[in-house]
Image (cartoon, grey):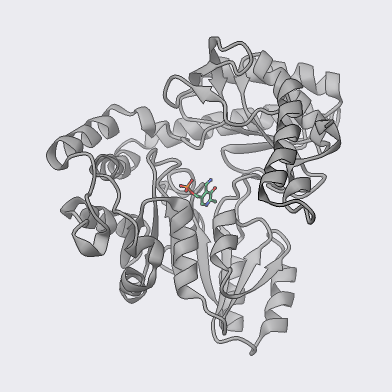
């Protein structure tokens, strides 16, 4: 099979092939893509997340140092001495696991402390912890929304939100488009019991920010609730890194604040912060919480310290923002299409899947670790290279990557605004 003629999405459903036949078709596709060095996913690293990483070359098996621009570890708290130390102390005190599900003996005092701390950080009454961010969104929505309700989703919300809405009615509005949101709200007006608008604070593939004030005001006008996924906003935006509501001075005004512990907080897991009644309801109705073992002591200890580091060391966030401003200005001056990126996530929008794969292959050859993003992760014709920055990237590393991008940009003709110069 010639993989350049297809994308993985083409094999999501094959009507006349059973399970194993379909696995075989996909395997043939993957073998060809790997042989062409077009399959850049699931690279294996032999060191932790940081501005550089020791990565095992998938073709030669050799270990090589690469500049790592594929992480969501924006503040690099995965390697912070304080988060490591706090994790080790919790590990030593409580052992390697929580031992049980939260309702049946798995809840430790440090879990309850973290719930209170993350709730306070987010300006909410209470919070509930989950062992994964995906499970947190999906498991919460499955518990909250029923067949008489409707979820009104920005078209770019994360897959965990889409999956969580399988038991309810769903309507999408065009990305960050408030006119379209209003149109959707006006058509669903009195037809559903609960209307819940769900958006991401910062969009994971675009790096742009949801227009929360307009969303909240439309919600009020049409009697809807608002849920925001703060996965990529927590620790990054807002004066104190508290996320999108803080960015817009709207703390405490959003009905449900979801988030992950896996990005700027440097660990794993998720949380929902809200009023205490809704949180308590989740304790007894959210199956992803009830039937899954509580977070490990090490993760819980590290997370409690990560929240303190965010407060005590604002210089980390300032360094991240220095990097963001510098990188953004240079990409715009070179003429790349970076959409409406406003944060640490930079899409280099190319639109042609094959070019995206080629550019990623070349970047990897140059020692720069980035990710290709194709349909269905983004809309067709908006495929891109996704680059993300950390506070610990040095100016020299940013310049190295910018120089390589400039060279590849010319070679592959992917700088549509070249010469326009005016920064957007
Ligand atoms: N929400 C968003 C916006 C995400 O980008 C992600 C993960 N990439 C998740 C939720 C799921 O979080 P986790 O990886 O912590 O399970």
- The residue that appears at 31% across and 38% down in the rendered structure is 309
Residue 53 pos. (x, y %): 49, 19
Q: Can you say whether 7 is above or below 30 in the image?
A: below
Residue 171 pos. (x, y %): 68, 72
Decide which of 207, 67 is in the foreground and name it.
Answer: 67
Residue 359 pos. (x, y %): 75, 24
Image quadrant in which the N terminus is located:
top right
| 256 displayed left or right of 130 | right
Query: In the rendered image, which quarter is residue 258 located in?
Result: bottom left
Query: In the rendered image, which quarter is residue 174 located in?
Result: bottom right
- The residue that appears at 74% across and 69% down in the rendered structure is 180
How many numbered callouts? 0
- The residue that appears at 70% across and 35% down in the rendered structure is 27
Judged from this view, the residue extending furthest toward the left is 93
Residue 255 visible in the current orientation: yes
Image quadrant in which the C terminus is located:
top right
Query: In the rendered image, which quarter is residue 85 located in?
Result: top left
Residue 421 visible in the current orientation: no
Judged from this view, the residue extending furthest toward the bottom is 190
- The residue that appears at 49% across and 33% down in the rendered structure is 320
């Amino acid at each position: 099979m010639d993989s350049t003629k297809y994308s993985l999405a083409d094999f999501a459903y094959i009507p006349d092939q059973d399970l194993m036949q379909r696995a075989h078709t996909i395997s043939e596709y993957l073998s060809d893509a790997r042989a062409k060095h077009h399959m850049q996913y699931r690279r294996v690293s032999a060191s932790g997340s940081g501005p550089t990483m020791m990565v095992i070359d998938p073709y030669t098996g050799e270990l090589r140092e690469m500049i790592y621009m594929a992480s969501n570890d924006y503040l690099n708290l995965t390697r912070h001495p304080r988060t490591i130390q706090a994790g080790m102390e919790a590990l030593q005190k409580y052992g390697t696991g929580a031992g049980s599900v939260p309702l049946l003996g798995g809840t430790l005092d440090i879990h309850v402390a973290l719930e209170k701390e993350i709730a306070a950080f987010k300006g909410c009454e209470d919070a509930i912890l989950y062992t994964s961010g995906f499970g947190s969104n999906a498991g919460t929505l499955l518990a909250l929304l029923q067949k008489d309700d409707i979820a009104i989703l920005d078209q770019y919300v994360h897959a965990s939100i889409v999956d969580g809405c399988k038991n309810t009615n769903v309507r999408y509005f065009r990305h960050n488009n408030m006119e379209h949101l209003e149109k959707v709200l006006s058509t669903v007006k009195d037809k559903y019991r609960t209307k819940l608008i769900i958006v991401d604070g910062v969009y994971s593939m675009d790096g742009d920010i949801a227009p929360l004030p307009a969303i909240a005001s439309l919600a009020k006008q049409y009697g809807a609730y608002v849920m925001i996924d703060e996965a990529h906003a927590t620790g990054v935006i807002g004066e104190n890194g508290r996320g999108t509501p803080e960015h817009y001075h709207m703390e405490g005004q959003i009905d449900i604040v979801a988030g992950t512990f896996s990005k700027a907080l440097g660990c794993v897991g998720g949380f929902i912060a809200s009023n205490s009644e809704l949180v308590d309801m989740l304790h007894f109705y959210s199956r992803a919480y009830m039937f899954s073992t509580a977070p490990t002591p090490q993760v819980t200890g590290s997370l409690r310290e990560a929240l303190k580091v965010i407060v005590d060391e604002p210089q980390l966030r300032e360094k991240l923002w220095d990097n963001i401003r510098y990188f953004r200005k240079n990409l715009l001056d070179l003429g790349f299409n970076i959409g409406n990126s406003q944060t640490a996530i930079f899409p280099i929008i190319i639109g042609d899947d094959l070019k995206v794969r080629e550019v990623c292959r070349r970047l990897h050859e140059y020692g720069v670790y980035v990710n290709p993003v194709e349909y269905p992760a983004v809309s067709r014709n908006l495929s891109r290279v996704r680059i993300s920055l950390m506070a610990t990237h040095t100016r020299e590393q940013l310049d190295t990557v910018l120089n390589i991008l400039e060279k590849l940009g010319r070679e592959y003709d992917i700088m549509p605004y070249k010469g326009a110069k005016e920064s957007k």
